[in-house]
Image (cartoon, grey):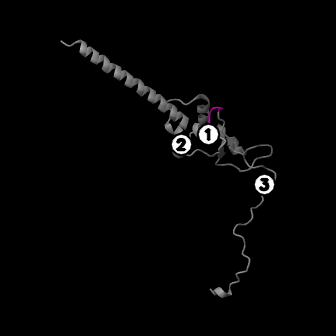
Amino acid sequence: IDVDALDVDMELPSETPPPAASRHSKKSPPCAGYVFPFKADQTASSDYPFKLHDTSIPPWEYNGNNAGVLTLWSIKCAKICEKGRSNCRACAELPRHPILQSILDRVAEGIPESTNYSFNPISGLIEHIQCKNSQIKCLRLRGLNAVRRIAAQARSHRP
Protein backbone atom coordinates (compact mmCIF):
# COMPACT_ATOMS: atom_id res chain seq x y z
CA ILE A 1 0.00 0.00 0.00
CA ASP A 2 1.40 3.34 -1.03
CA VAL A 3 0.50 5.60 1.88
CA ASP A 4 1.60 8.74 0.05
CA ALA A 5 -0.90 8.06 -2.75
CA LEU A 6 -3.90 8.02 -0.39
CA ASP A 7 -6.17 11.04 -0.60
CA VAL A 8 -6.71 12.06 3.05
CA ASP A 9 -9.21 14.75 2.11
CA MET A 10 -11.47 12.23 0.41
CA GLU A 11 -14.92 12.02 2.01
CA LEU A 12 -15.59 8.62 3.54
CA PRO A 13 -19.05 7.07 3.59
CA SER A 14 -20.75 7.29 6.97
CA GLU A 15 -20.34 4.29 9.28
CA THR A 16 -24.04 3.73 9.83
CA PRO A 17 -26.57 4.03 7.07
CA PRO A 18 -29.57 6.25 7.78
CA PRO A 19 -32.48 4.29 9.27
CA ALA A 20 -34.96 2.99 6.77
CA ALA A 21 -38.34 4.59 7.21
CA SER A 22 -41.00 2.03 7.93
CA ARG A 23 -44.54 2.48 6.73
CA HIS A 24 -45.69 2.90 10.38
CA SER A 25 -42.94 5.14 11.76
CA LYS A 26 -44.57 8.50 10.97
CA LYS A 27 -48.10 7.52 11.96
CA SER A 28 -47.67 5.25 14.97
CA PRO A 29 -46.23 6.25 18.35
CA PRO A 30 -43.66 4.02 20.07
CA CYS A 31 -44.97 1.22 22.27
CA ALA A 32 -45.35 2.37 25.88
CA GLY A 33 -45.19 -1.21 27.19
CA TYR A 34 -47.28 -2.38 30.14
CA VAL A 35 -47.16 -0.18 33.23
CA PHE A 36 -47.12 -2.41 36.31
CA PRO A 37 -50.04 -1.50 38.61
CA PHE A 38 -48.90 -0.92 42.19
CA LYS A 39 -51.15 0.01 45.09
CA ALA A 40 -50.76 3.50 46.55
CA ASP A 41 -48.49 2.28 49.37
CA GLN A 42 -46.30 0.10 47.12
CA THR A 43 -43.24 0.92 45.05
CA ALA A 44 -41.35 -0.79 42.25
CA SER A 45 -38.16 -1.04 44.30
CA SER A 46 -39.82 -2.88 47.18
CA ASP A 47 -42.83 -4.69 45.68
CA TYR A 48 -41.70 -6.27 42.39
CA PRO A 49 -39.90 -9.65 42.51
CA PHE A 50 -36.74 -8.70 40.58
CA LYS A 51 -34.99 -11.94 41.61
CA LEU A 52 -37.44 -13.75 39.33
CA HIS A 53 -35.38 -12.55 36.35
CA ASP A 54 -32.30 -14.35 37.73
CA THR A 55 -34.01 -17.68 38.41
CA SER A 56 -36.25 -17.94 35.34
CA ILE A 57 -36.63 -16.16 32.05
CA PRO A 58 -40.02 -14.45 31.91
CA PRO A 59 -41.14 -13.28 28.46
CA TRP A 60 -40.72 -9.60 29.30
CA GLU A 61 -38.08 -7.04 30.13
CA TYR A 62 -38.51 -4.34 32.73
CA ASN A 63 -37.45 -0.76 33.27
CA GLY A 64 -38.07 1.36 36.34
CA ASN A 65 -37.62 5.06 36.90
CA ASN A 66 -37.09 7.33 39.90
CA ALA A 67 -40.79 8.16 40.01
CA GLY A 68 -41.52 4.55 40.96
CA VAL A 69 -43.06 3.58 37.63
CA LEU A 70 -42.19 0.08 36.47
CA THR A 71 -42.77 -0.64 32.79
CA LEU A 72 -42.69 -4.13 31.29
CA TRP A 73 -42.09 -4.83 27.60
CA SER A 74 -42.79 -8.15 25.95
CA ILE A 75 -39.77 -9.78 24.32
CA LYS A 76 -42.01 -9.88 21.23
CA CYS A 77 -42.72 -6.13 21.42
CA ALA A 78 -43.37 -4.56 18.01
CA LYS A 79 -41.84 -1.26 19.26
CA ILE A 80 -44.72 0.68 17.68
CA CYS A 81 -48.45 0.84 18.41
CA GLU A 82 -51.41 0.38 16.21
CA LYS A 83 -53.47 3.49 15.67
CA GLY A 84 -55.42 4.47 18.79
CA ARG A 85 -53.43 2.24 21.17
CA SER A 86 -50.73 3.06 23.71
CA ASN A 87 -48.96 -0.30 23.43
CA CYS A 88 -48.47 -3.09 20.90
CA ARG A 89 -50.48 -6.32 21.01
CA ALA A 90 -47.64 -8.34 22.60
CA CYS A 91 -47.27 -5.86 25.49
CA ALA A 92 -51.05 -5.61 25.88
CA GLU A 93 -51.19 -9.41 26.31
CA LEU A 94 -48.63 -9.45 29.16
CA PRO A 95 -51.17 -9.27 32.04
CA ARG A 96 -52.68 -12.53 30.78
CA HIS A 97 -49.36 -14.42 31.05
CA PRO A 98 -49.54 -16.97 33.94
CA ILE A 99 -46.33 -15.80 35.65
CA LEU A 100 -47.29 -12.13 35.54
CA GLN A 101 -50.84 -13.03 36.55
CA SER A 102 -49.52 -14.73 39.71
CA ILE A 103 -47.33 -11.69 40.48
CA LEU A 104 -50.34 -9.39 40.05
CA ASP A 105 -52.38 -11.67 42.35
CA ARG A 106 -49.66 -11.45 45.03
CA VAL A 107 -49.57 -7.66 44.71
CA ALA A 108 -53.35 -7.50 45.16
CA GLU A 109 -53.87 -10.21 47.81
CA GLY A 110 -50.55 -10.47 49.62
CA ILE A 111 -47.81 -13.05 49.50
CA PRO A 112 -48.50 -16.55 50.85
CA GLU A 113 -45.95 -17.75 53.40
CA SER A 114 -45.13 -20.79 51.25
CA THR A 115 -44.04 -18.66 48.26
CA ASN A 116 -40.56 -19.39 46.93
CA TYR A 117 -38.12 -16.63 47.93
CA SER A 118 -37.30 -15.81 44.29
CA PHE A 119 -40.95 -14.78 43.81
CA ASN A 120 -40.87 -12.55 46.90
CA PRO A 121 -40.23 -8.85 46.50
CA ILE A 122 -38.02 -7.09 49.06
CA SER A 123 -41.06 -6.04 51.07
CA GLY A 124 -42.16 -9.69 51.30
CA LEU A 125 -38.71 -10.80 52.44
CA ILE A 126 -38.63 -8.06 55.09
CA GLU A 127 -42.06 -9.17 56.29
CA HIS A 128 -40.81 -12.78 56.57
CA ILE A 129 -37.72 -11.68 58.50
CA GLN A 130 -39.80 -9.59 60.91
CA CYS A 131 -42.12 -12.56 61.49
CA LYS A 132 -39.15 -14.90 62.11
CA ASN A 133 -37.58 -12.34 64.48
CA SER A 134 -40.84 -12.14 66.40
CA GLN A 135 -40.96 -15.95 66.67
CA ILE A 136 -37.35 -16.06 67.86
CA LYS A 137 -38.03 -13.37 70.46
CA CYS A 138 -41.07 -15.30 71.73
CA LEU A 139 -39.12 -18.58 71.92
CA ARG A 140 -36.23 -16.89 73.78
CA LEU A 141 -38.65 -15.39 76.29
CA ARG A 142 -40.36 -18.75 76.73
CA GLY A 143 -36.95 -20.41 77.27
CA LEU A 144 -35.89 -17.74 79.78
CA ASN A 145 -39.16 -18.14 81.69
CA ALA A 146 -38.70 -21.94 81.74
CA VAL A 147 -35.16 -21.56 83.14
CA ARG A 148 -36.39 -19.16 85.84
CA ARG A 149 -39.26 -21.49 86.76
CA ILE A 150 -36.91 -24.49 87.02
CA ALA A 151 -34.44 -22.46 89.10
CA ALA A 152 -37.23 -21.36 91.46
CA GLN A 153 -38.44 -24.96 91.82
CA ALA A 154 -34.89 -26.13 92.51
CA ARG A 155 -34.46 -23.49 95.24
CA SER A 156 -37.75 -24.43 96.89
CA HIS A 157 -36.87 -28.16 97.04
CA ARG A 158 -33.56 -27.75 98.90
CA PRO A 159 -33.13 -29.67 102.14
Image coordinates for residue 82, horizontal then vertical, percent: 77, 46
Name the residue carrying label 2: 51
Sequence-wise, the earlier of marks 3 and 1 is 3
> Please, what is the three-letter code of the amino acid marked with disc 1?
Ala
Return the mark for residue 44. Answer: 1
Q: Mark 1–mark 2 contact, CB under 8 Å?
A: no
- Judged by depth in the image, the label closer to the viewer, 3 or 1, is 1
Query: Split into 4 quadrants, where in the image is the N terminus?
Result: bottom right
Tell me the CA gap for discs 3 and 2. 35 Å
Q: Is residue 1 above or below residue 16?
A: below
Magenta stretch in the rendered image: 39-43
The CA span between labels 1 and 2 is 13 Å
Which structural element holds mark 2?
loop
Q: Tag count in the figure?
A: 3
Name the residue beneath numbered marker 3: 25
Compared across the picture, whether 80 is left or right of 140 comes to right
Which mark is in front, 1 or 2? 1
Q: Amino acid at mark 3?
A: Ser
Up the image or down, 153 lies above or below 43; here it is above
The disc labelled 2 sits on which kind of residue?
Lys
